[in-house]
Amino acid sequence: MVTWLNVVRKIAPGQSVPYYARSRKSQCQAFSIVDVSNGAVEVRATTGGLRRITRANFEAVADVWEDYKAERIPRASVPTFNSSYILSLINLLEQNTVS
């Protein structure tokens, strides 16, 4: 399971994160990491807007990741406003076999 500690240790400012959607229908190509701290990650969307992802938001989405990925829950059941960014971070970290 990907944890907040994985995010803090493996994600860095300037890094590009590919957008992930289970349906493979991407709304954008990628977003970039602006800042990483113990309490939040700030990302820049392709539209240029900044989003702040808190640890609590991340953990709420991480709790349902396995069910979402296995198609046991629909996308609409994934919590938080920033879930698209969080799902993408979790997917990237999982793809890179974070332990």
Image (cartoon, rainbow, N blue to C red):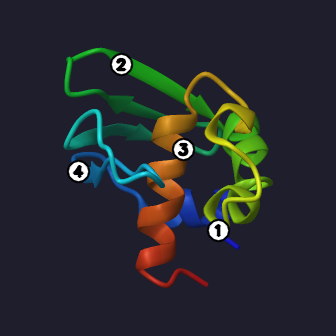
Q: Earlier in the sequence, mark 4 or mark 3?
A: 4
Q: Which mark is residue 16?
A: 4
Q: Position of residue 53 (x, y in %)?
A: 56, 32
Residue receiving disc 2: 50
> Horizontal placement of 61 versus 36: left or right?
right
What is the spatial separation of the Cα atoms under label 4 and label 2, in whole angstroms? 14 Å
Q: Is residue 19 above or below residue 46?
A: below
Circle 2: residue type: Leu
Quadrant position of the N terminus in the picture:
bottom right
Q: Helix, strand, or loop for circle 1?
A: loop
Q: Is residue 15 above or below residue 93?
A: above
State yes or no: discs 4 and 2 in contact (Cβ < 8 Å).
no
Q: Residue at x 32, y 45 (%)?
A: 25
Q: Position of residue 65 (x, y in %)?
A: 69, 58
What is the spatial separation of the Cα atoms under label 3 and label 2, in whole angstroms? 14 Å
Q: Position of residue 80 (x, y in %)?
A: 68, 27
Q: Earlier in the sequence, mark 4 or mark 1?
A: 1
**Figure disc tally:** 4
Residue receiving disc 1: 2
State yes or no: discs 4 and 3 in contact (Cβ < 8 Å).
no
State yes or no: discs 2 and 1 in contact (Cβ < 8 Å).
no
Q: Residue at x 20, y 18 (%)?
A: 47
Q: Helix, strand, or loop for circle 2?
A: strand
Residue receiving disc 3: 86
Q: Is residue 10 above or below residue 40?
A: below
Q: Helix, strand, or loop for circle 4?
A: strand
What is the spatial separation of the Cα atoms under label 1 and label 3, in whole angstroms? 11 Å
Q: Is residue 67 above or below residue 34?
A: below
Q: Earlier in the sequence, mark 1 or mark 3?
A: 1
Residue 33: image quadrant is top left
Q: Earlier in the sequence, mark 2 or mark 1?
A: 1
